Image (cartoon, rainbow, N blue to C red):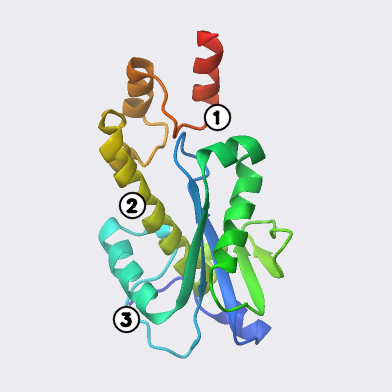
Amino acid sequence: MVVVADFSIENEIGANFIAGCDEAGRGPLCGPVVAAAVIFPNREIEIPVVIRDSKKMSAAQRAIAYDWITKNTIWATGQCTSAEIDELNILWASMCAMERAVAGLGQTPDMCLIDGNRVPKNLRGRAIIKGDAKSLSIAAASIIAKETRDKIMRELALEFPQYGWDRNAGYPTAQHLTAIEKYGITKYHRRTFGPIKERIKDET
């Protein structure tokens, strides 16, 4: 098994309950931003699946990892809706989603490891740039966040199938942009994001 990340950072800190935190969905034009928090209560456990940066995994690998992580860790997700993203901006909505994920753990972590360069103001933690490639806790959170958000977008695609969200997850693909031009925007689109904001401006 090839695992890029490990528990070196967690073991260096030495606390028992360390939560890895990551988010999915900063870049899409619609849908929520979803964060996940994951605690490995036993860092000596044998991990029989690939856990790494979710963006570097295949869909099949992520599905297998998601199943194992949800059965063997303490985990939770949190999200901010498209309306909240428009109100807060995507950075602060992402921070808020992480705080909600940690609050949902049911176990207060001794420390949070945050993917990126900023720690949410209400969390005790450490920011780690490219943390999903260094910390197994963060990598696991990246998988939970992405799998959760992809599922949400597949469900929203049942309501608005013309946008292809089950395939593009709301990202600004050519097909998605063409659908926006043809069918307009929905209640799930982020009205402060470039292509959507420009369309609203053109219509006023």
Give the residue number, with chain letter if any, for mark 3: 48
Residue 151's tag is 2
Does residue 130 appear in this view? Answer: no
* Residue 169 x/y as whole percent: 36, 42
* SS under mark 2: helix
Q: Earlier in the sequence, mark 1 or mark 3?
A: 3
Quarter of the figure with residue 72: bottom left
Please identify, in this view, whether the residue under mark 1 or under mark 3 is nearer the observer: 1
Question: Where the C terminus falls, by quadrant?
Answer: top right
Quarter of the figure with residue 146: bottom left
Give the Cα separation between the discs numbered 3 and 2: 24 Å
Does residue 158 appear in this view? Answer: yes
Q: Residues within 10 Å of mark 1 (few under 14, many from 20)?
A: some
Give the Cα separation between the discs numbered 1 and 3: 40 Å
The answer to whether marks 2 and 1 mark residues whose Cβ atoms lie closer than 8 Å is no
Residue type beneath disc 1: Phe
Q: Is residue 51 left or right of residue 166?
A: right
- Establish if 79 lies above or below 36: above
* Residue 89 x/y as whole percent: 64, 39
Which residue is located at x 54 percent, y 69 percent? Answer: 134
